[in-house]
Image: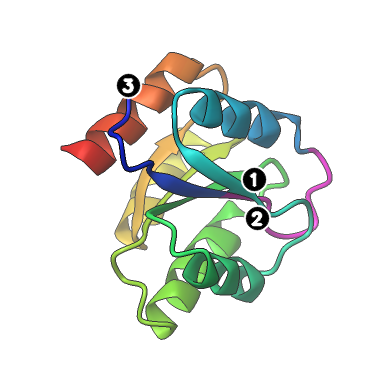
């Protein structure tokens, strides 16, 4: 599915959210599809996520939020990436995110938001199209 030069994706769990099953499932699916995936683990700050993204030279950052803090945490990750000169890193997210919050997240620089029940195929297809044209 993906090109010979693997797409590098960081999957991160910002904030105090303690449930990471969905993030791990997405990470594994992207890995199995040919991406290089780095998983940060739980309880990462936006600064930590941006630092890891720059250090690992990733193409994209996938954020997962189930705690309701997405309107604060997702834009903060984008801001931290910009502060480090990583404007080219594509940030996307998923989790329990109300539809009415999506325009605000997109305006803050989030490229796409995946809601509950999104198929792994849909996520893989979006990543493939986003990073391979």
Which quarter of the rendering shows the C terminus?
A: top left
Q: Main secondary structure of the magenta part?
A: loop
What separation in Å lies between label 3 and label 2 (alpha carbons)?
A: 33 Å
Asked whether, in this view, residue 124 is left or right of residue 65, the answer is left
- Which residue, given by chain and number where applicable, does mark 3 sit on? 1
- Which residue, given by chain and number where applicable, does mark 1 sit on? 65
Magenta span of residues = 11-19
- Which residue, given by chain and number where applicable, does mark 2 sit on? 69
Which residue reaches farthest right?
A: 18
Which element type, helix, strand or loop, lies under badge 1? Answer: strand
Residue at point 36% right, 61% down? 89
Say which label, 3 or 1, has the lower sequence index.
3
Please, is residue 110 above or below residue 102 in the view?
below
Where residue 57 appears, as percent x and y from the top left, is 44, 64
Which element type, helix, strand or loop, lies under badge 2? Answer: loop
Which quarter of the rendering shows the N terminus?
A: top left
Q: Are marks 1 and 2 in contact (CB under 8 Å)?
A: yes
Please, is residue 81 above or below residue 8 in the view?
below
Q: For mark 1, does the 10 Å Cα neighbourhood hold few (<14), some (14 to 19), or many (20 or more) residues?
A: many
């Amino acid at each position: 599915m993906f090109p010979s030069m693997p797409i590098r994706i960081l999957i991160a769990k910002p904030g105090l959210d303690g449930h990471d099953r969905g993030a791990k499932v997405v990470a594994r699916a992207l890995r199995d599809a040919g991406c290089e995936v780095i998983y940060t683990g739980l309880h990462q700050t936006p600064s930590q996520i941006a630092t890891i993204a720059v250090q690992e030279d990733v193409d994209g950052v996938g954020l997962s939020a189930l705690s309701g803090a997405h309107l604060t945490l997702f834009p903060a990750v984008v801001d931290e990436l910009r502060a480090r000169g990583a404007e080219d890193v594509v940030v996307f997210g998923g989790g329990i995110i109300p539809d009415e919050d999506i325009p605000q997240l997109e305006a803050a620089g989030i490229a796409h938001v995946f809601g509950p029940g999104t198929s792994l195929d849909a996520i893989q297809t979006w990543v493939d199209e986003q990073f391979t044209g």
